[in-house]
Image (tube, grey):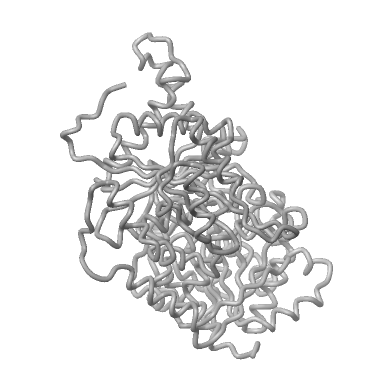
Amino acid sequence: MKKINKKEPMTKYIFIVGGVMSSVGKGVAAASIGKILQSKGFNVSAIKIDPYINVDAGTMNPTEHGEVFVTDDGDETDQDLGNYERFLDRNILSDNYMTTGRVYKTVIERERNLGYGGKCVEVVPHIPEEIIRRITSASKKDDDDIMIVEIGGTVGEYQNMLFLEAARMMKMQNYHDVIFILVSYLPIPGKVGEMKTKPTQYAIRTLNSAGIQPDFVLCRGEKSLDEIRRQKIGLASGIFPDNIISAPDVDSIYEIPLNFEKEKLGEKILQIFGWSPKINGQHLEDWQNLNKIIKNPEKKVRIGIVGKYFKTGDYVLKDSYISVLEAIKHAAWFHNAEPNIEWLDAGSYEDHPEKLEELQNYNGVIVPGGFGSRGVEGKIKAIEYLRENKIPFLGLCYGMQLATIEFARHVCGLTRANTAEIDPESPELVIDLMPDQVEKMQKKNYGSTMRLGAYPCVLDKKSRSYLAYGQEEISERHRHRYEFNNKYRDSLAEKGLLFAGLSPDKKLVEIIELPDHPFFVATQFHPEFKSRPIKGHPLFNEFIKAGLNNKKSD
């Protein structure tokens, strides 16, 4: 493998790996560390590595994997890229996401094109070399000072070995430019009543077996790490106790950077790199102000989400709509309000329409994106109720399409109005398959073939959306196959539906509104992907504002 010239300006790399169990917060830990270092004046970005064979996250069931996050350049990625974008307030693109499938696909295609000059291509070293190429290429693209690389899963998983090997090789080449942080959970068994360190010690030993010694351990747990256990882990693992960081549960993930800074994590990382902060004085002031609002809101707002990707067995999987949830929170905090978010099962409205009356209890209701027929009629009934009872409504992607169907059926008299996704034989397809998608669907070519990524939209200056954005042309991210059928545009407009946002060539409907409603806005795109905690997204901000003016739930 080609050696990196040590005289060149070097990007520093921080690898985040998990021990003991997954889903303990590696993504928000990575994002929080990035935010801390960014606040000290450094250009910071992040990469997510997922060990599955899937080329991207687009074909995975959200109840198994969580939300599919879409980048500006149209990549379907893991939800952690959303955390990176929200914390760092910057767009993270496709170069910053890789999977085992994506890496192997590239190596195989290169071999088929004689890219290896006839050599025998092997798992080692060629797969780790491709991983390293991707990491360094992404960091050079934006001239990053620091690149944070999160490796999904845990250190003990076989499928992670090649990513760990790539990280080890980078460390050996550039010893002072690469550090490792292990995020490990310290359980407190109910019948024992004591925080146990052995699982974390075992995780460190497992990482050692891959040739890697962590520089820091982030100790996740219900409670803060005490000094006795800090010393115990340090003694057992050979890690300096001051680099064993307490990471207790918090009410808001946006508190995590502040908690890490209490233990001077950013300063300790920079010391290892031999750097000093580029910005003097107070850091994370905006984050401190945000947390003051979160902890001491002036009012409350109650928002219902009507959907179907909620349950996995006996548990509710909030990750299916994580960007929507965060966007609601950001907008509520923008208005100095505490968001109370509740899940509403669309299927229950199909069997028990009397339950629709519960929608009166909410300041506003969202119908988010999704796929398939389950719960669709329940969502349409909910939208009808929200429209007729003047309850603030925000529809996202599929929510926009179903709002169009509801309006066509119950206002325009198109009783068989439907989407080709549900009933392709309907004589009144107000939502139809995009022309370029027909051949793809016939060939069952599903991966990365939807309308994906950022597209421009021109707003009607009379619309509520224009009022929210304050500008005529916007750019938002899409993820869908079906579009509004322009055959019905005139008939729906005559009955009062405002096409508030169109593509620049006016061929695609991007936003619909009802002008005579307190707030009835639905978008073909996913505005939640571009929401940020400090300022919120304009449409969500306006939706929450309308909700706070809706006093029905008080």
Q: Is residue 415 left or right of residue 130?
A: right
| Residue 126 to residue 383: above or below | above
Please tell me whether residue 449 is drawn above or below residue 41 in the rendered image.
above
Residue at the image position 63 percent from the left and 60 percent from the top:
318
Quadrant of the image containing the N terminus: top left
- The residue under the point 52% across, 83% down is 546
Placement of the C terminus among the 4 image quadrants: bottom right
Q: Which corner quadrant of the image does residue 463 belong to?
A: bottom left
List the single residue furthest toward the right. 351
Q: Residue at x 51, y 79 (%)?
A: 544
On the rendered structure, is 70 left or right of 378? Answer: left
Q: Position of residue 60 (x, y in %)?
A: 61, 43
Between 168 and 144, which is closer to the camera in this rendering? Answer: 168
- Number of disc labels: 0
Q: Position of residue 439 (x, y in %)?
A: 57, 36
Q: Residue furthest left?
A: 7
Q: Is residue 140 left or right of residue 127?
A: left
Tell me where residue 166 sits by quadrant: top left
Q: Is residue 268 above or below residue 287?
A: above
What x and y, as percent, mark residue 225? Answer: 53, 60
Camera-side residue of 36 and 52: 36
Q: Nearer the viewer, residue 132 or 460?
A: 132
In this view of the protein, can residue 439 be seen by the observer?
A: no
Which image quadrant is residue 121 in? top left
Nearer to us in this view, 399 or 553: 553
Residue 405 visible somewhere in the drawing: yes
Where residue 288 appears, x then y in whole percent? 38, 74
